[in-house]
């Protein structure tokens, strides 16, 4: 019977996305469709699927893999304060917003406790504080909002709505469970996660180099991390889902290749996770639930609670976004299912909620997943889109750098030049954006924000001064540093030292030699460089929308000629069927007027 039930579940997992694609059902998350299918296949309707040891084990693995993949979705770089921000940053808005969620959840949970509906207010507060990160990410990706302040803010709220309730749930279960082990042992999980991160960062890079199709070392490492942290979590009396979640964070911090994340996602959402969601539906007995007047009355009350808990979000979001989008974001953040289902499992294990109450909670969560994305799509309106220009700071103002700055400032770059020479400031201030510094000390440059940029260009003729400036820029972790280095004294190691540190070094003599050689060997290439309309450009692929897309399928492929793709420190000669990967550097020639639109599409972080 177990084999037949498994066969039915696997067939349903295959059929669900096909049916949704056939009838163009895009507003409802697949997870919700799988839970509903489980309800239909279970004792509530047809009763053709029964819970058994095999399906229960696969479902348990499903929730562990789901938590692991959820951990991999967290991007903690979004919590870093924004430099030179003129508006409230996404991190501040998200933290204040989530604080209101916790507060309103506590109020509603207390009301339920006082009225006798649900006695455990702390547990109910944790459940109401949850947000479905997976559903939120899918909705934001669909509208390509992850790169915008609105998308980043809602994503951070959702991330907090997974991380904080999950940790709180683990602490609550440890304090109220039957385990005699101290809650302080939970620190062992975090220590283990840090140890694994530090231990496997370098080996992972080695694995990536020697990996092949028959070994799949990246996948083996992922499951080693999962089982290790899940085992530690269970051994100290914590919930296994916390261990799996931390394993996902560790894996993300190892910076896996895009192919690795795709394989893990395929394995999880292709097999384990659908079984978990469908078995969640199978375990809900609607006949019993709807036959109980108290349970029937509980469903709308619990549903109101999910929206009540997020109700103040609209006022917080209005501090930064237009009213309609604040409402849209509130509805999207009201979506919850990912943590609710595991939390209810913990609640049943602790015997603080009944199966009937758990079923009512699950149905209320399913309803939020059905209607919240629909309401989000209905209310959301495009914010005025300002494409973020690349910020370039020139330290050194002279005849070499000023013409370059003038040309770049007309296009996709935000240029600022810094000089400590009053004569040069008075000469060039009317032509470009120049800031006069009293001196070029490290503190003065830091205070002036000279290193708060995407690219720093060090343009002094004095290579010793450029070397010192480069060290300061490296300390400030500037993404790209370009340094002029005219001297190539064989007795000096500074030239090679800068290159080894990742600084892009250029030398006027070398550049002139290369230019003259190009003029002789490839005059047409030089013509492209000098042409006012055409040019050679490099764009980095940050938009996941293009991941896996073949070159011939790019929407703008007829407007450009792709000559090289730089990937994993190697150049690839592209063909029509060459697939685009996240992080690819596409080097192409084409009309300059089309570059802004192409860059906006490819470099949008989504």
Image (cartoon, rainbow, N blue to C red):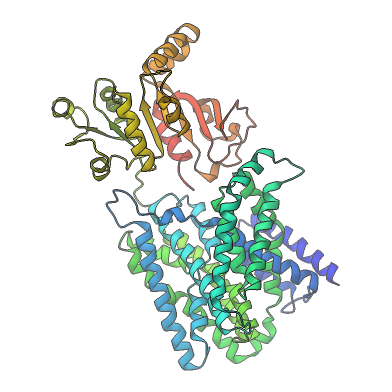
Q: Residue placed at 65% from the left, 66% from the top?
A: 230
Whether residue 390 can be seen here: no
The number of numbered discs placed on residues in the rendered structure image is 0
x and y percent of residue 300 in the render?
Answer: 52, 82
Kindly indicate the quadrant of the structure image that contains residue 214.
top right
- The reply, left or right, for residue 51 in relation to residue 404 is right
Seen in the picture, residue 82 relative to 213 is either above or below; the reply is: below
Residue 288 vs residue 198, the one in the foreground: 198
Q: Residue furthest front?
A: 491
Seen in the picture, residue 441 relative to 110 is either above or below; the reply is: above
x and y percent of residue 521 in the render?
Answer: 50, 8
Whether residue 192 can be seen here: yes
- The reply, left or right, for residue 420 in relation to residue 54 is left
x and y percent of residue 485 in the render?
Answer: 36, 23
x and y percent of residue 465 in the render?
Answer: 30, 29
* The N terminus lies in quadrant: bottom right
Kindly indicate the quadrant of the structure image that contains residue 277.
bottom right
- The reply, left or right, for residue 227 in relation to residue 93 is right
Q: Residue furthest top?
A: 520
Residue 559 vs residue 485, the one in the foreground: 485
Q: Residue placed at 58% from the left, 66% from the top?
A: 189
Seen in the picture, residue 486 relative to 24 is either above or below; the reply is: above
Q: Residue placed at 75% from the left, 69% from the top?
A: 57
């Amino acid at each position: 019977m177990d084999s037949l039930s498994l066969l039915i579940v696997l067939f349903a997992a295959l059929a669900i996305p096909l049916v949704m694609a056939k009838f163009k059902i895009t507003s409802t998350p697949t997870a919700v469709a799988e839970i509903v299918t489980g309800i239909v296949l279970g004792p509530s309707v047809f009763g053709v699927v029964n819970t058994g040891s095999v399906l229960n084990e696969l479902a348990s693995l499903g929730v562990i893999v789901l938590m692991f993949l959820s951990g991999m979705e967290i991007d903690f770089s979004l919590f870093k304060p924004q430099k030179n921000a003129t508006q409230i940053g996404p991190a501040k808005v998200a933290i204040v917003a989530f604080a209101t969620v916790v507060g309103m959840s506590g109020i509603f949970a207390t009301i339920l406790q006082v009225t006798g509906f649900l006695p455990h207010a702390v547990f109910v507060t944790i459940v109401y504080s949850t947000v479905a990160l997976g559903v939120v990410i899918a909705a934001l990706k669909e509208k390509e909002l992850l790169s915008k302040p609105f998308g980043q803010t809602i994503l951070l709220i959702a991330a907090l709505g997974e991380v904080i309730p999950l940790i709180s749930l683990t602490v609550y279960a440890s304090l109220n469970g039957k385990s005699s082990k101290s809650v302080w042992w939970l620190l062992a999980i975090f220590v283990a996660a840090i140890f694994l991160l530090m231990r496997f960062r370098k080996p992972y890079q080695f694995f990536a180099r020697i990996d092949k199709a028959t070994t799949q070392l990246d996948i083996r490492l992922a499951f080693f991390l999962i089982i290790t942290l899940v085992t530690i979590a269970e051994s100290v009396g914590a919930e296994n889902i916390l261990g799996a979640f931390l394993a996902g964070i560790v894996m993300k911090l190892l910076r896996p290749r895009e192919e690795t994340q795709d394989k893990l996602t395929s394995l999880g959402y292709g097999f384990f996770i659908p079984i978990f969601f469908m078995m969640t539906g199978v375990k809900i007995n609607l006949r019993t639930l709807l036959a109980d007047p108290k349970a029937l009355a509980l469903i709308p009350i619990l549903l109101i609670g999910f929206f009540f808990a997020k109700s103040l979000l609209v006022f917080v979001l209005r501090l930064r976004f237009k009213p309609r989008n604040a409402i849209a974001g509130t509805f999207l953040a009201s979506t919850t299912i990912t943590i609710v289902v595991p939390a209810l499992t913990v609640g049943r294990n602790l015997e603080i909620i009944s199966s009937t109450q758990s079923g009512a909670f699950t149905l209320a969560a399913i309803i939020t997943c059905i209607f919240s994305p629909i309401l989000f799509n209905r209310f959301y309106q495009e914010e005025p889109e300002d494409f973020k220009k690349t910020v370039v700071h020139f330290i050194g103002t002279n005849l070499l750098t000023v013409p370059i700055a003038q040309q770049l400032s007309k296009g996709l770059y935000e240029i600022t030049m810094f000089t400590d020479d009053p004569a040069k400031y008075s000469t060039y201030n009317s032509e470009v954006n120049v800031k006069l510094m009293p001196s070029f000390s490290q503190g003065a440059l830091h205070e002036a924000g000279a290193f708060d940029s995407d690219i720093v260009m060090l343009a002094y003729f004095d290579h010793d001064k450029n070397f010192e400036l480069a060290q300061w820029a490296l300390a400030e972790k500037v993404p790209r540093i370009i340094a002029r280095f005219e001297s190539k004294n064989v007795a000096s190691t500074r030239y090679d030292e800068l290159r080894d540190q990742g600084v892009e070094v250029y030398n006027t003599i070398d550049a002139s030699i290369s230019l003259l050689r190009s003029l002789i060997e490839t005059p047409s290439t030089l013509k492209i460089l000098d042409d006012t309309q055409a040019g050679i450009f490099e764009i980095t692929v940050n938009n996941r929308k293009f991941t896996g897309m073949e070159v011939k399928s790019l929407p703008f492929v007829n407007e450009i000629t792709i000559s090289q793709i730089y990937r994993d420190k190697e150049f690839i000669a592209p063909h029509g069927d060459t697939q685009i990967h996240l992080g690819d550097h596409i080097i192409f020639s084409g009309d300059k007027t089309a570059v802004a639109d192409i860059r906006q599409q490819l470099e949008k972080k989504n």
